[in-house]
Amino acid sequence: MEVSLFQSSQVKIGRAELGNREFGFCKLSGDLRTQISFGRKTSWKNGRVQFTLRAVQSESIRPVKVPGRVKRSNSNDGVRLLVGLPLDAVSDCNSVNHARAIAAGLKALKLLGVTGVELPVWWGVVEKDAMGKYEWSAYHSLVEMVQKAGLEVHVSLCFHASNQLKISLPDWVSSLGESQPGIFFKDRSGQQYKECLSLAVDELPVLNGKTPIHVYRDFCESFKASFSPFLGSTITGISVSLGPDGELRYPSHHQSVKRGKIPGVGEFQCFDENMLSGLKQHAEATGNPLWGLGGPHDAPSYDQSPYSNAFFKDHGGSWESPYGDFFLSWYSNQLISHGDRILSLASSTFGETEVTVYGKVPLMYSWYKTRSHPSELTSGFYNTSSRDGYEAVADMFGRNSCKMILPGLDLSDVHQLHESHSSPESLLSQIIMVCRKHRVEISGQNSSVSGAPGGFQQIKKNLLGENGIDLFTYQRMGAYFFSPEHFPSFAGFVRSLNQLELQSDDLPGEDEATESIHSNSEAGIHMQAA
């Protein structure tokens, strides 16, 4: 294959086919004639992608900019837009998945004016076999691929697992968990959550004589040494995993909720031996030893409403009692202390580089309109109608000079189930206000690529507002992302943010596009995704 993205001010791109189906074309910008079509597949693993590239005249691509925004001293003029790479861009066998498809996708993103991509880097892949034995080669290949495409990389260091992708924690950690079950979170019924370590063991020597914090630090140091030529140039940002799915929270909602079903309140995750030991010590220290025997006995289970038991009731619920305040304060403080330890080690490790360090805070918006905010309480945020639980979180981010990632910028109140008493917009506004107070800068993400109703308009509303968001990551690249049901809408969203304009009379006709396909078949790219 011979592809020159920028050659004598010309950009080459043409047909794309995934599987054996072809679809229509979408126009990206003025003189830039870009024809893209992807077939519909549920998984990249079974997809065959073919590209045909044809030279057309093109203007130079400019970064995405939002008109009217005030330039910030430490950022570009406007919103930088990233797109997440597939979660399994590197397999659990440490090989690059869908390499050619990703390379072609990077070219399409570059043509759109996207700033860069987000790359998930899995602890369970890099340090899979033994503590201190790191294998970065596949990730090196991906970073070099992005660099050649002229894009930036935001790396997400994932100290959690993904059951969906069958990417586990390192094998040696999982083996230790068989003999030390206390290293994992446990709920009231005794069910373990094995996709991240319990925060209660952060500073306990449970990993072959080392603490998890020590192991995380060694991992970050190895990453810094291995990728030092890219730091501050190609790699501009690093986020560190703070818990389940990389977010600062307890795994209180790890059971999936079907679309259209009212979500439950989740469950407190304080029943592993180390969490219980910490609770017992705290209760004894405060003179209430009986309060340290376990978590709340009158709280609902995962999929139940806050009104099914006494703890979260709006009036007379246990959450407002002295015991409730004791437990919720301790539970929340443990989470914030964990976040402080992780962000502190990341900030100290990468502080002398030119990269920005981030951490992700979830948007637990279900039941937000109730007085107790139960979904937030079980997740570890002591936020109620009478108490701001994000002050301490923002203060912790500020102390560590880290930026905060907030997901859910595509969610609006009008599309929430009335019975769930949800308000993603109100919660987002609350967190943004407290971050502004503590001078913590934020970046945004969407909730999922499948798309919330009116999602692109809601994202644009949040980015164009006074929220101070200068970086947005759209999740995530894959077969659906490039499908005709989605990609034209995404391209239109990008165009609405940047300075490039769509001129309908520049769209290639079907005959012209077909002629381009056949006349340029010699430049086709055939691949079988891994």
Image: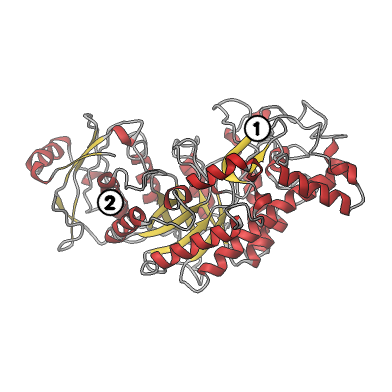
Residue 190 placement, left or right of 168: right
* Residue 403 visible, this angle: yes
For discs 1 and 2, the disc positioned in front in the rendered view: 1
Q: Position of residue 520 (x, y in %)?
A: 9, 44
Q: Nearer the viewer, residue 389 or 419?
A: 389
The mark tally for this picture is 2
Task: Residue type at mark 1: give it.
Answer: Gln
Q: Position of residue 266 (x, y in %)?
A: 68, 34
Q: Position of residue 6 (x, y in %)?
A: 20, 60
Location of mark 1 (residue): 191
Q: Nearer the viewer, residue 99 or 126?
A: 126
> Which numbered disc flags the more N-terminal residue, 1 or 2?
2
Q: How is the image coloured?
A: secondary structure
206 vs 70: above or below:
above
Task: Residue type at mark 2: give it.
Answer: Ser
Q: Assess whether mark 2 and mark 1 are in contact (beta carbons under 8 angstroms).
A: no
Q: Could you tell me which residue is drawn at 63 percent across and 30 percent down?
A: 263
The numbered dot on residue 16 is none
Residue 306 placement, left or right of 153: right
Q: Could you tell me which residue is drawn at 44 percent across and 49 percent down?
A: 129
* Residue 408 visible, this angle: no
Location of mark 2 (residue): 29
Label 2 SS: loop
Label 1 SS: loop
Q: Nearer the viewer, residue 457 or 22?
A: 22
Q: Residues within 10 Å of mark 1 (few under 14, many from 20)?
A: few
Q: Residues within 10 Å of mark 2 (few under 14, many from 20)?
A: many
Residue 122 placement, left or right of 468: left
Q: Could you tell me which residue is drawn at 40 percent across and 63 percent down?
A: 235
160 vs 259: above or below:
below
